[in-house]
Image (cartoon, helix red, strand yellow):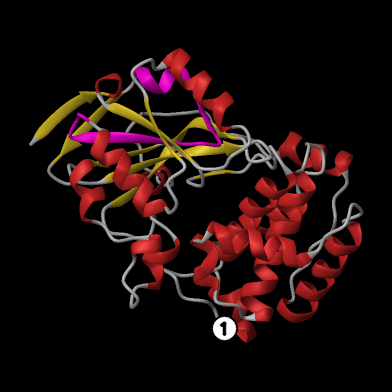
């Protein structure tokens, strides 16, 4: 089996909830993809994606998060399906405007509609499956692609930035939903994920609200590994707002950053400095963003190039 599908022939659905920059991002998407549709205000990742699948008139649907701005050249690409990947979800990497990280977080995704309708994730997950409560990427037939086709703007408010950092601070240390042992933390967490979370916790002071993303990542890692909270709440936006308000941060958040960094160093043996604006910019200058390659190249295949 071999099938070619132009991206421009697939329905695009913009999924937004409470992102302060969602309307602006929606306007920008409609400029380059006038056929795009929108799902807004539906609570829960599973439910909102099912609504996106319901309004799609094509067998596949492309989803764009409310905090995401896509590159127009994505629409010029062609999906190449074969006997192996015909029923896969494809997730392209996105560039994070706070810290210049690029991975699947917040990226464009292309789903078989039937896949979405049959999945049980996040708020609709089965109780015995912690992985599906937290993240799509641990599900079967989920393929992470190499290329970057969008930018994730998660700094529209202090809370938006904190929430994004907090969720990644938890998710990045999990292995298919399972928490590592605190005593063997450095050995059990994937090295690449550990590198990513360190960047979340230290880089971003040079952009508006970037320090809150750093704070959120530190708080998330502290909560899951030291406070040992019920980390499956990471999907619940009501609970996340409650957690943010309970932290009771004040305008000077440097002491909070430093305190969390000291605790993480003491309990997990990781160094978490507070980088200022200039140090953050210096890092970004040398943290190179790769150029796109063949459209269907997966992240796993890219390591052999």
Vertical position of residue 40 compared to residue 219: above or below: above
Q: Is residue 216 above or below residue 276?
A: below
Let me know if residue 74 is in the magenta part.
yes
| In the depicted structure, whether residue 182 falls above or below residue 81 | below
Q: Position of residue 169 (x, y in %)?
A: 62, 62
Magenta-span inclusion, residue 141: no
Quarter of the image where the N terminus is located: top left
Q: Badge 1 is on which residue?
A: 181
> Is 112 located above or below residue 78 in the figure?
below
Residue 211, position as x, y percentages in the image: 79, 48
Q: What percent of the width, then of the height, locates residue 178?
A: 46, 75
In which quadrant will I find the C terminus? top left
In the image, the segment drawn in magenta is 57-76
Which of the 4 image quarters holds residue 273?
bottom right
Viewer-proximal residue among 75 and 124: 124
| Structural crowding at the residue carrying mark 1, measured as other residues with C-alpha within 10 Å and reported as few (<14), some (14–19) or many (≥20) | few
As rendered, which of 63 and 263 lies closer to the eye? 63
From the top left corner, tell me how far across and down residue 143 is, in percent. 33, 48
Q: Nearer the viewer, residue 160 or 170?
A: 160
């Amino acid at each position: 089996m071999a099938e070619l599908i132009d991206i421009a022939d697939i329905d695009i659905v913009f999924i937004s909830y409470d992102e302060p920059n969602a309307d602006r991002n929606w306007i920008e998407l409609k400029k380059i993809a006038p056929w795009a549709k929108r799902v807004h205000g539906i609570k829960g990742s599973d439910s909102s994606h099912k609504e996106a699948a319901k309004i799609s008139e094509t067998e596949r649907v492309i989803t764009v998060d409310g905090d995401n701005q896509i590159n127009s050249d994505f629409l010029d690409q062609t999906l190449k399906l074969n006997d192996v990947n015909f029923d896969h979800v494809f997730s392209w990497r996105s560039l994070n405007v706070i810290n210049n990280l690029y991975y699947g977080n917040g990226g464009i995704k292309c789903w078989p509609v039937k896949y979405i309708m049959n999945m049980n994730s996040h708020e609709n997950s089965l109780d015995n499956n912690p992985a599906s409560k937290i993240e799509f990427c641990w599900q079967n037939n989920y393929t992470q692609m190499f290329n970057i086709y969008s930018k994730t703007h998660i700094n529209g408010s202090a809370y938006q930035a904190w929430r994004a950092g907090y969720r990644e601070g938890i998710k990045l240390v999990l292995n298919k939903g399972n928490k590592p042992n605190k005593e063997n933390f450095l050995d059990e967490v994937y090295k690449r994920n550990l590198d990513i979370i360190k960047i979340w916790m230290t880089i971003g002071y040079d952009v508006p609200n970037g320090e809150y993303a750093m704070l959120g990542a530190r708080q998330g890692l502290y909560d899951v590994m030291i406070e040992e909270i019920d980390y499956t709440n990471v999907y619940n936006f009501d609970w996340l707002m409650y957690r943010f308000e309970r932290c009771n941060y004040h305008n000077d958040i440097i002491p909070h950053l430093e305190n969390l960094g000291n605790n993480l160093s003491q309990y997990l043996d990781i160094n978490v400095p507070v980088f200022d604006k200039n140090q953050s910019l210096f890092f970004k200058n040398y943290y190179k963003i790769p150029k796109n390659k063949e459209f269907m190249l997966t992240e796993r295949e890219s390591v052999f190039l």
